């Protein structure tokens, strides 16, 4: 049985290619109306997983269930899942409305109903005025919205998106991300979204699933994952700050000695003993610059070796003994300056 | 993610050719695949299939044909529709299999039609029932062309659907 609200259930899926494991026991459920995002680097197995769910590839072990029913015997074209890919695969010689209506033609609907539904889908992506335009005359972002309308029009029971914004430039991507989130949550169709881009994943997902070497290593709401990445790899992949090795010098309250000085990490894993080795995450912000040089906990001292402007802050890399650490400062500093950076409580987190 | 393999087989079910494509559309009755013509250019009296031409291939799971829309290279210029009479397509995982039954119909961008390889079709030793299915399917295709039904919606409204002048353009 699927869980109470789960419509899609992926149960212990395994897959290898020429002896190399691609997926190693992947399990998750997707609820009605939920947007889940599979986030991973290329080669992590995320696209393979999507192909298996779509029915384009068989799993070696495990099951894909829809409302509790095993889909093994259901071929890809009969699963009722909508697909949307990176390259907006539109029909170049058809106009916008014809492209959107394409998936409705085989549903035995009267032509008027096909047109009504296609126009409705176009309205959802805010392209009503573009119905009779040639798709080749549209911008990349507009083409991608047509592709989304085309995927939504037949009312799929699940929408699968594989790097749908991958080919667009950053500004357009940010704009379309907001639109996409709005359209998908308004539509209520559960969606499985695959990307390698952290920002895209955080912006779009109700639920984030990080996939690495064929396994889901962390799953939760974007806020949960952000607050507690769990393991070092996740923190690094999400680029949450600097990872640093430390040794426990006091167990309660927890204090650890590191190349960045004495740090007071927050820890969700229970007690640690003196001398134990830890991996800590030092977040980039919020931090403040201290004038004084008095040694204290959560105060990082070092020499500025790199500064880059980030729009709303300055990303500063400090060299502190053999360790480098990166912070976001609200004001510019110069390379070569000696700085003392004070970390707020909660800026240092204990990882597994 | 959307990669698939198309396997063309003969009437015995023996593999003739396979090529890679990507899915443009997937529903219970129709799978649309985009592929490139990767073989050397073929010049036919009614159509030149050039290396690199874009093919939008419609496979049907219940119809006795498939239809290739042929576009010139990267452009959206339609060269015509090449229809292969075939057994209903089988979709297994990412493999689409189609048993070709020799008979073809070419439809020009203006809607002129040309039935091809009838003699080859007649020479096939297929069952009477299948032969009848293929003839019915050919009639259905020709009707779709006349009525601009999918996948021939792009035919211009003034198009003539009669099998007429298809002499090579000089």
Image (tube, coloured by chain):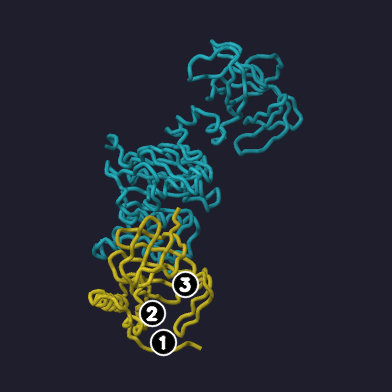
Instruction: Specify the subunit that label 2 lies on.
Output: B
Q: In this figure, which residue is indicated by the disc labeled 1?
A: B166
Q: Quadrant of residue A256?
A: top right
Assess disc 2: are there few (<14), some (14-19) or many (≥20) residues with their C-alpha within 10 Å of its C-alpha: many
Mark 1 touches mark 2? (CB < 8 Å): yes
| Chain B as rendered: colour | yellow
Q: Quadrant of residue A101?
A: bottom left
On screen, A346 above or below B75? above
Circle on res. B106: 2
Q: Position of residue A38 (x, y in %)?
A: 45, 41
Circle on res. A348: none
Sooner in the amino-acid sequence: mark 2 or mark 3: 3
On screen, A311 above or below A290? below
Residue visible at 44% across and 64% down?
A: B34
Can residue A202 be seen from the camera position used here? no
Which structural element holds mark 1? loop
Sooner in the amino-acid sequence: mark 1 or mark 2: 2
* Chain identifier, cyan in the render: A
Mark 2 touches mark 3? (CB < 8 Å): no
On screen, A295 above or below A94? above
Assess disc 1: are there few (<14), some (14-19) or many (≥20) residues with their C-alpha within 10 Å of its C-alpha: some
Instruction: Specify the subunit that label 1 lies on.
Output: B
Instruction: Specify the subunit that label 3 lies on.
Output: B
Sooner in the amino-acid sequence: mark 1 or mark 3: 3
Circle on res. B71: 3
């Amino acid at each position: 049985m699927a869980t109470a609200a789960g419509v899609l259930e992926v149960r212990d899926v395994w897959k290898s290619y020429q002896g190399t494991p691609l997926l190693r026991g992947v399990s998750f459920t997707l609820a009605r109306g939920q947007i889940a995002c599979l986030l991973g680097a290329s080669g992590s197995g995320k696209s393979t997983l999507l192909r298996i769910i779509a029915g384009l590839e068989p799993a070696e072990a495990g099951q894909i269930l829809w409302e509790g029913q095993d889909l093994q015997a259901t071929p890809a074209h009969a699963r009722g899942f909508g697909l949307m890919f990176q390259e907006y695969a539109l029909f170049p010689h058809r106009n916008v409305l014809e492209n959107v209506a394409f998936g409705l033609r085989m549903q035995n609907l009267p032509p008027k109903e096909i047109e009504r539904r296609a126009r409705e889908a176009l309205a959802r992506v805010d392209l009503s005025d573009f119905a009779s335009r040639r798709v080749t005359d549209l911008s990349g972002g507009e083409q991608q919205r047509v592709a989304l309308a085309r995927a939504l029009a037949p009312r799929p029971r699940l929408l699968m998106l594989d790097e749908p914004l991958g080919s667009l430039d950053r500004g357009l991507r940010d704009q379309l991300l907001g639109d996409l989130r709005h359209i998908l949550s308004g539509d209520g169709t559960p969606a499985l979204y695959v990307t390698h881009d952290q920002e895209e994943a955080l912006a779009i997902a109700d639920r984030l699933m990080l996939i690495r070497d064929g396994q889901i290593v962390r799953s939760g709401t974007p806020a949960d994952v952000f607050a507690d990445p769990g393991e070092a790899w996740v923190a690094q992949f999400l680029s949450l700050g600097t990872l640093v090795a430390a040794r426990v010098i006091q167990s309660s309250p927890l204090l650890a000695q590191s190349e960045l000085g004495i740090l007071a990490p927050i820890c969700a894993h229970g007690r640690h003993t003196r001398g134990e080795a830890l991996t800590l995450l030092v977040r980039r912000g919020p931090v403040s610059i201290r004038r004084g040089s008095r040694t204290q906990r959560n105060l990082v001292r070092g020499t500025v070796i790199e500064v880059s402007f980030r729009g709303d802050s300055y990303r500063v890399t400090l060299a502190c003994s053999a360790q480098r650490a990166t912070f976001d400062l609200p004001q510019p500093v110069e390379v070569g300056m000696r700085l003392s950076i004070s970390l707020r409580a909660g800026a240092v987190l204990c990882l597994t | 993610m959307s990669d698939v393999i198309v396997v063309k087989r003969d009437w015995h079910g023996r593999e003739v050719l396979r090529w890679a494509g990507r899915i443009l559309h997937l529903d219970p009755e129709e799978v649309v695949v985009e592929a490139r013509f990767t073989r050397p250019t073929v010049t036919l009296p009614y159509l030149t299939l050039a290396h690199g031409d874009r093919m939008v291939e419609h496979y049907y799971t219940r119809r006795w044909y498939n239809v290739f829309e042929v576009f010139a290279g990267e452009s959206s210029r339609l060269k015509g529709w090449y229809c292969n009479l075939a057994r209903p397509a089988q979709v297994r995982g990412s493999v689409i299999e189609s048993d070709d039954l020799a008979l073809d119909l070419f439809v020009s961008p203006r809607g002129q039609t040309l039935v091809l390889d009838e003699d080859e079709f007649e020479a096939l030793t297929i069952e009477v029932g299948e032969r009848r299915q293929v003839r019915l399917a050919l009639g259905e295709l020709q009707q779709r062309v006349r009525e601009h039904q999918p996948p021939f919606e792009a035919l211009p409204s003034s198009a003539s659907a009669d099998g007429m002048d298809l002499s090579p353009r000089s």
